[in-house]
Amino acid sequence: MFDLASLAAFSFTVLVIELTPGPNMAWLAVLTVGEGRRAGLAAVAGIAIGLTVIATATAFGLGAVIERSAFLYAVLRWSGVIFLLYLAWDGWREADERPHLNGKRGYGRYFLRGFVINVLNPKAALFYIAVFPGFMSPDRPLAAQAAVLAVISVSIATAIHLSIVGLADAARPFLEDKRRHRFIKRALSLLLAGVALWLLISTAR
């Protein structure tokens, strides 16, 4: 269905895009520093499912509908930005709490948040709309090609997100000091707020 050169080029494209700081990176760092590795892993699972849903919807034409509908696009755009700002505020508010070295229960909410961040991110849909066609052949089954590309892109994204969780979790013992923890948590929260504003500006039409 694909030659190795095309798959390699697509994988490299996805890798470069995923390594660009964005909502998932900033939020995973904030979450893992505050709540621990299990919370981060739950969020990574939610993000992966969210990206899979967006990729599947795009393959079946929903992404193009969103792109053409100014109203739907605006709803997704503003909902995503507001949700990210809420997460940044939540991280800032919890900065005075000591890090929970054993994490908290209720990891389902972190899964759900990871899912929502990506479903409400119009840039995710636009990525699939813009990038997928360049690596797909009209002479071959489009759905099957889209499925292969979606699996590759979600796998690369998930590997990067797992690395972020691992690095943030490794730093937690250093953050047992309350002042260091507060500083890092608030710095990451400000970064997440900045990413939300960047998303608002970069997706403006």
Image: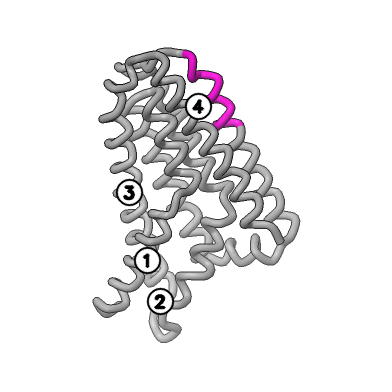
Kindly tell me whether residue 44 is visible in this rendering: yes
In front here: 35 or 119? 35
Q: Which of marks 3 and 4 is in front?
A: 4
Inspect the magenta stretch and tell me whether residue 122 lies in it.
no
- For the residue carrying disc 2, how many other residues have a C-alpha within 10 Å: few (<14), some (14-19), or many (20+)? some
Residue holding disc 4: 186
- The earlier-in-sequence mark between 1 and 4 is 1
Q: Amino acid under label 3?
A: Ile
Where residue 182 appears, as percent x and y from the top left, is: 45, 20
- The earlier-in-sequence mark between 2 and 3 is 2
- The earlier-in-sequence mark between 2 and 1 is 2
Where residue 58 appears, as percent x and y from the top left, is: 52, 63
Q: Which of marks 4 and 2 is in front?
A: 4
- Look at the numbered discs 3 and 4 and tell me whether their residues touch, using CB distance below 8 Å: no
Q: Is the magenta stretch mostly helix, strand or loop?
A: helix
Q: Amino acid under label 1?
A: Leu
